[in-house]
Image (cartoon, rainbow, N blue to C red):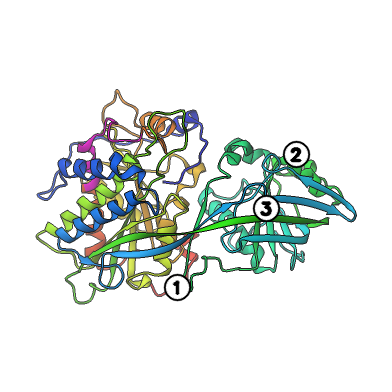
Amino acid sequence: MRLPSVISFSLVVMSLIGCGGAAGSDENSALSAEASALRGHLEFLASDELRGRDTGSRGHEIASLYIASEFKQLGLEPAGDDGTYFQRINFRSSTLKENTARLAISYGDDVVELNYPKEFLTAPSAYHEQVNVTAPMVFVGYGLVSEAFDINDYDGLDVSGKVVVTLAGRPEFLPSEEGAHLNRNKAKYAAERGAVGMLSIHTPAREKVRPFKVSALYQRAPNLVWLNADGEPNQIYKGFTNLGSVDTKAAENLFRKAPVDLPTLLLQTENDESPRGFALNASVTLAKESVHEAISSPNVAAVLPGTDDQLKDEYVLYTAHSDHVGVTRDLSQDDHINNGAMDNASGVSVMLETARMFAESAQRPKRSVLFLAVTAEERGLLGADYYAHYPTVPINQIVANVNLDMPVLLYDFADIIAFGSTHSTLGDTVAEAAGSFGIELSGDPMPEQAIFTRSDHYAFVKQGVPAVFLMTGFTAKDEDKNGGEIWGEFFEKHYHRPSDSPDLPINYEAGVVFTNINFAIGQQIANADERPRWLPDSFFGQLNDSSDR
């Protein structure tokens, strides 16, 4: 799962207040998940031999072969490319060349150069090995556009051929999930209006979430993008450049000749106002060089065909990412392998056991069930995004996506969380399935994190597919244990660290319950007379013209 690199443990625990769950007796159906199978899958996928399953690594290739072998043993049909279980994706890895990043602000003959990486940060370019952009600057507030929320930060501004300067983040009045979606599309809004680039201001509010110095630590990490059939990066606007981010104090240089200075604008945001845009009466020059490397990595896909003549061409899609973050470069630690036991060997293990249950069920589902282990989630949800653009079944015939990412199987949970459950009829489906096992469906305990936009299902949501992202809830059946504290402690001490390993006190019996619920959800979707629907007032239901879905 891609979560913020900096999070307050106390905030996680505080967010648990009011999140309840009713414990009850487990009701096991005749067909049940098996703890030993979950353990076997997880211990193999999270073993040191796979060295953290980084995208493009030998370890991830072995993991992919293992998953495909399991699908084949279950008798599932290949659903990859060319009659195989694999959808091979070509990626371009880009790294910023040392000592080439330069950012200069010009006010006529007066030029101010900012220091990299102390005052500005920039990412490598996936499209060009050399970038040199010079253009006038226009401040566009938060840089957002939304008819649903009556926002147009570009109203009355001419940004054609210019670099737009935006404030990081979004206004406080926006709901977290919807605001996160709009925030992710800032470059799109700018490029659609003819801008040649975008520069973001690192605000004090952003500093509280992710300090500028922390972001600077990741500047040497390569960026990954998938390549289309023509070998070009997944970038719609080829003439557009994301220049990067400027630290708050250094950003005052952008406003030297502007009608309003930066401190005044930041004060407006503190008062819940959205600053209006204006020309900055200055230009910016960004130069940098990038080094490119070719990488290949597969998604793994299999399908259990449905039995109903009318419904078998519709698909219930399960997703779980098979990659993790590989080997750490932190030489201060003795253990350098990020095994990714909870993130996400646990999710893949649950998916594989769910697939077994479907394959061995006495009553095959009416709709087909598609199982997809995606790569490059940790690099930006790339494997799922590629599949959503190049699906091996028609995208409008995928009726729902159930995503499994980092179920923290460290306690006997009394509730589950299904991010996205409030946006579609899938919420009722999850509640009914969980309830049959004495498990309650709880609301999102961390709405400020906008997790609904942070995992692989989001790629399918953007294509109009109703989706839920399942996670263990924060209420433990044992009254002496606090599930939220256990979850928060895992995130604080083990997330994306070598200690996320099979040595953790993994509760495989809790994994059985989680898997049984997951299977029951899929059964209901696969056998229902009607496919899931977005709720009429869902913002995400309007992202894609789903009138024919």
Q: Which residue is mark 2?
A: 249
Extreme-right residue of the structure: 109
Q: Which residue is mark 1?
A: 229
Instruction: Give the x, y percent position of residue 48.
Output: 30, 39
Quick check: marks 3 and 2 in contact, CB under 8 Å? no
Q: CA distance from mark 3 to mark 2?
A: 18 Å
Residue drawn at (47%, 43%), measured in percent from left and top?
3
Q: Which residues are magenta?
A: 500-515
Q: Is residue 188 left or right of residue 270?
A: left
Secondary structure of the residue carrying numbered label 1: loop
Q: Which callout, 3 or 2, points to the residue nearer the camera? A: 2
Q: Is residue 189 left or right of residue 436?
A: right
Q: Is residue 268 left or right of residue 40?
A: right
Nearest the eye: 445 or 201: 201
Q: Is residue 114 visible?
A: yes
Crowding around mark 1 (Cα neighbors within 10 Å: few <14, some 14 to 19, many 20+) is few
Q: Amino acid at mark 1?
A: Ala
Q: Quadrant of residue 311?
A: bottom left
Residue 505: say if magenta: yes
Q: Which residue is mark 3?
A: 142
Query: Is residue 203 placed above or below 354 in the rendered structure?
Result: above
Q: Amino acid at mark 2?
A: Lys
